[in-house]
Amino acid sequence: MDADICIIGSGVGGGAVALSLADSGARIAILERGERLPREAQNTDPTAVFIDRRYRTKESWVDGTGAAFTPGQYYFVGGHTKFYGTAMFRLREQDFEASEHEDGVSPAWPLSYAELEPYYAQAEALFGVHGESGVDPTEPPRSSAYPYGPIPHEPLIGALAEKLRLRGLHPFHMPSAIDLREGGACIRCGTCDAFPCRLGAKGDAEVCLIDPALQRPNVSLHTGCRVTRLITDDAGKRIVAAEFERNGVTETIRAALFVLSAGAINSAVLLHRSATPQHPNGLANSSGAVGRFYMNHNTTGLMALMPFTVNDTRFTKTLSLNDFYASGAGNIQMLGNIQEPMLRSAVPSLPSWVGRPLAHHSVDWLVMSEDLPHADSCVRVLPDGRTQLDWRRTNMATHAAFVKQTRQLLREIGFSAVLGRPFGLDVPSHQCGTVRFGDDPASAPLDPFCRAFDHPNLYVVDASFFPSSAALNPALTVAAQALRVGEHLKANLHTF
């Protein structure tokens, strides 16, 4: 195969770059290791999704101790957005600046919020984000309104928002990418967060980025292509080809420009697998930072119980709270309604007759705090070819205090008890930081436009570029930076 531009991965990063360049006339080939996710009855079946793990990878990874686990990875066109909860937050202005935390420093980004703001607006338009401005006390400046108004609260969630307001807090409508506009496809079903959408109403990368890009005849999508290594020229500088496996056959694609968007973990893995005599520690790694500084938010799910009230809310993810964000604690937002098979998946010993009433009588929340970059938080490739994910968690005392504070708040607004469970290593849904960008090639693999310092025609555009994780969902920031990179590439295509 030959192309002008080869994009590896069809998630938010790869999809936004592809759409940005679609009208350039360049021949763009998108390689995706998975297939299109079928729209089928099992999409909304919690037993199929959580017990049978119908869509989850069967890969075996190992943790820092060498113990094997199955990661929460999904390989489909659109990447992890096929299963995300549609949250589309902008990072706050303070998140782009250095800040002190209990376990160290959250480093500054090599660009400001103001530089990224126009691309946030573009990304919100592409994903059709519903939102509300002027309520969240941490909200950064905006150059334009949300494309669509906020998703209305259903009665129970609206009542909770009012109780929080009466306590002097500032609950706001969570920015969300669902097609709930007039005539839109969304029916506000009860299976959105962590489920694929059988109606195509979720604002995912396949629907909002890949399919529109494919309307151009110069853009092609190749599924079932697992890229195994990047190949350099004899000097070890330029990437000349990517090697991939498809249907048991090893193939290559040559291109002038490569954009790696396989996700923070797999992008780092691929760079390591592509080691050469000139680059024995992997490509783009003269800094030694590739695979290091892995981050994944500190998150805890809470089930707030109300024994005498059934939670009949269908779409719960309309409420969020940032009153504790500026202090470094983090964000509170709704989870999708927990159903009994989801509980059984997390706690296999829990009998169904116990899990069912718990699920029916709970309102479910996500408490999220920042994880700091740690040099020993690493993604490696073991000699047997398996991926090792060694996560050295940080800021856990802050997160524990925030969870305790949130439990108390929920009890104060009327819940009789609050159960909690932290998310672990096997839930890498907010993975970031493994190929970070910066101004200094001695400490960062990528420049501020996500171009590899070591390879002039290689860009890495997914959440791996994050130098810090902040404490908000990363999807919109990945999209905004990818649009910024796409604009930069379009202006410089003649140089590749």
Image (spheres, rainbow, N blue to C red):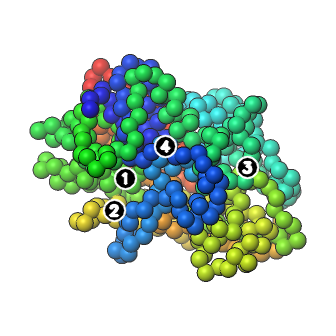
**Res 437 seen here:** no
Residue 188 in picture, x, y percent from top left: 74, 46
In this view of the protein, which residue sits in the foreground, 228 or 325?
Answer: 228
Q: Secondary structure at mark 3?
A: loop
Residue at 40% across, 19% down: 24
> Which residue carries the number 2 mark?
387
**Do the residues under discs 4 and 3 have CB atoms within 8 angstroms?**
no
Q: From the image, state whether disc 4 or disc 3 is nearer to you.
A: 4
**Res 44 seen here:** yes
> Which residue carries the number 4 mark?
36
Residue at 38% across, 18% down: 25
In the figure, residue 63 lies in which quadrant? bottom left
**Split into 4 quadrants, where in the image is the N terminus?**
top left
Real-space Cα separation, disc 4 to disc 3, in angstroms:
22 Å
Q: Which callout, 4 or 1, points at the residue further toward the start of the chain?
A: 4
448 shown above or below 160:
above
> Which residue carries the number 3 mark?
189
Q: From the image, state whether disc 3 or disc 2 is nearer to you.
A: 3
Q: Secondary structure at mark 4?
A: loop
Q: Amino acid at mark 1?
A: Asn
Q: Which callout, 1 or 2, points at the residue further toward the start of the chain?
A: 1
Residue 102 in picture, x, y percent from top left: 52, 66
> Which residue carries the number 1 mark?
266
Q: Residue 463: give its label.
A: none
Residue 60 in picture, x, y percent from top left: 38, 66
Q: Amino acid at mark 3?
A: Cys
Q: Which callout, 4 or 3, points at the residue further toward the start of the chain?
A: 4
In the figure, residue 47 lies in which quadrant? bottom right
Q: Secondary structure at mark 2?
A: strand
Q: Amino acid at mark 2?
A: Thr
Density class for disc 4 (Cα within 10 Å; few <14, some 14-19, many ≥20) is some
Q: From the image, state whether disc 1 or disc 3 is nearer to you.
A: 3
